[in-house]
Image (cartoon, rainbow, N blue to C red):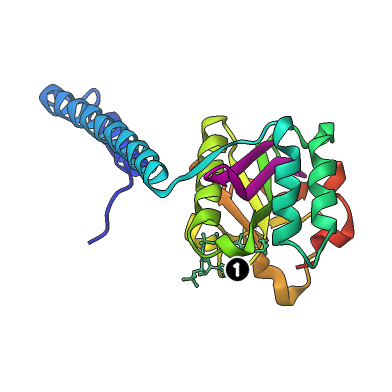
C-alpha cells in the first residue's frame, strides 16, 4: 500500500481544506482536518526526538563519539585522512586547503573518535549553482574517511547521517557528492546529472552515476538546474576524477 510522507500528508490536508473552504456545512470537516494535521505534526516531532534519543544511545553504547572537529583537532583529522587515503596524499592537502579557504564556508567538519582515538572524518563545504534561476543553498560532501581497521562498522554511515542532519537544520537544500554509486544511495543520494545538475568538471559518461545529489528540502530537485560551483580549493580537475 502506498504511504504518505509527513510532508505529503500535510500538503494533502492543506489542499482538502482549501477545497472545502467557503462551502456551507463543511466547518466540522475543516476542524477535523486541522486537528488531524496537528496530530500528524506531533507524531513527526515525537518520531524525531525518538530517533535522536536512539542515535545518542547507540553512540553511548558503541563507544564511538561523533562531534564537530575544531582547529585543535586538525592533526587528528589529517591523520584519519592520511590513513584512509594512503594511496592518495592529495586528499590530505585538500582538507588542509579547504579548512582555510573562505569560499568553502560554511564548513561542516565532523570527527569520529573511539575511546579518544580519531577513526573517521567527514567534511561538507559550501557550493552554489551557476545558471539556476534562484539562489540555492548547497553543500558538497568531500572527503569521507574512515581508518582501515575501523571500516565496515557503520562509522562512515553515521558521519554522513550526522552531517546531513546538521546541514538540514542549517537550511541547506541540496548536498552533492562524487563517490561510490554503491555506497551513497543508502543515504538518499541519487544521480545528479539526470536532474540537470552538472558537476564543476565534466564527469566521463561511464562514471556519470558517481555524481550524486541528496535533497534536504522537498520540491527543490527538478525545480533547479545548472552547474555546481565548488570552493576554490576544490576547483581543480584532479579532484573531479572518479
Ligand atoms: C568508503 C568509506 C568512507 C566507508 O566507510 P565505512 O565506515 O567503512 O562504511 P560503513 O560501515 O558505513 O558502510 C559499510 C558498507 O558500505 C559499503 N561500502 C563500503 N566501502 C565501499 C566502497 N569502497 N565501495 C562501495 N561500497 C562500499 C558496503 O556496502 C559496506 O557494507 P558491507 O561491509 O556489508 O559490504 C571507507 O571505506 C573509507 O574511508 N574508504 C577509503 C576512503 C574512501 O574511499 N572514501 C570515500 C570517498 S567517496
Q: Looking at the image, which is closer to me, 118 or 21?
A: 118
Q: Quadrant of the C terminus?
A: bottom right
Q: Is residue 16 left or right of residue 167?
A: left
State whether residue 220 is above or below residue 213: above
The residue drawn where x is 69% and y is 60% is 84
The residue drawn where x is 67% and y is 43% is 124
Quadrant where ligand 1 appears:
bottom right
**Crowd tier of the residue under label 1, counting other residues whose Cα lies within 10 Å: few below 14, some 14–19, many 20 or above:** some
Q: Looking at the image, which is closer to me, 194 or 186?
A: 186
CB at disc 1 and ligand 1 closer than 8 Å = no
**Image spot of residue 221 (x, y percent):** 57, 49
The residue drawn where x is 24% and y is 35% is 43
Quarter assignment of residue 2: bottom left
Q: Quadrant of the N terminus?
A: bottom left
Q: Which residues are magenta?
A: 107-131
**Image spot of residue 59 (x, y percent):** 42, 43
Instruction: State the SS at label 1.
Output: loop
Q: Is residue 229 left or right of residue 21?
A: right
84 in the magenta segment: no
**Image spot of residue 48 (x, y percent):** 34, 36
- Does any portion of residue 27 appear in the rendered image? yes
- Does any portion of residue 231 appear in the rendered image? no
State whether residue 103 is above or below residue 227: above
Q: Which residue is mark 1?
A: 181
Q: Looking at the image, which is closer to me, 181 or 137?
A: 181
**Image spot of residue 37 (x, y percent):** 24, 31
113 in the magenta segment: yes
* Secondary structure that dominates the magenta span: strand
Amino acid at each position: 500500500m502506498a504511504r504518505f510522507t509527513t510532508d505529503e500528508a500535510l500538503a494533502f490536508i492543506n489542499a482538502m481544506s482549501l477545497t472545502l473552504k467557503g462551502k456551507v456545512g463543511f466547518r466540522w470537516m475543516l476542524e477535523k482536518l486541522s486537528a488531524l494535521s496537528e496530530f500528524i505534526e506531533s507524531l513527526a516531532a515525537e518520531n524525531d526526538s525518538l530517533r535522536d534519543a536512539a542515535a545518542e544511545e547507540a553512540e553511548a553504547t558503541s563507544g564511538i563519539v561523533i562531534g564537530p572537529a575544531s582547529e585543535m583537532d586538525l592533526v587528528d583529522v589529517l591523520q584519519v585522512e592520511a590513513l584512509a587515503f594512503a594511496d592518495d596524499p592529495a586528499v590530505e592537502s585538500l582538507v588542509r586547503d579547504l579548512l582555510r579557504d573562505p569560499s568553502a564556508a560554511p564548513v561542516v567538519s565532523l570527527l569520529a573518535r573511539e575511546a579518544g582515538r580519531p577513526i573517521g572524518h567527514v567534511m561538507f563545504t559550501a557550493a552554489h549553482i551557476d545558471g539556476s534561476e534562484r539562489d540555492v543553498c548547497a553543500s558538497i560532501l568531500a572527503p569521507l574517511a574512515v581508518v582501515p581497521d575501523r571500516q565496515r562498522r557503520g562509522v562512515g554511515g553515521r558521519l554522513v547521517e550526522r552531517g546531513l542532519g546538521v546541514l538540514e537544520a542549517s537550511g541547506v537544500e541540496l548536498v552533492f557528492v562524487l563517490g561510490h554509486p554503491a555506497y551513497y544511495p543508502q543515504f538518499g543520494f541519487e544521480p545528479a546529472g539526470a536532474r540537470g545538475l552538472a558537476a564543476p568538471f565534466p564527469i566521463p559518461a561511464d562514471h556519470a552515476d558517481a555524481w550524486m545529489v541528496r535533497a534536504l528540502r522537498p520540491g527543490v530537485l527538478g525545480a533547479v538546474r545548472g552547474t555546481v560551483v565548488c570552493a576554490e580549493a576544490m576547483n581543480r580537475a584532479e579532484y573531479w576524477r572518479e
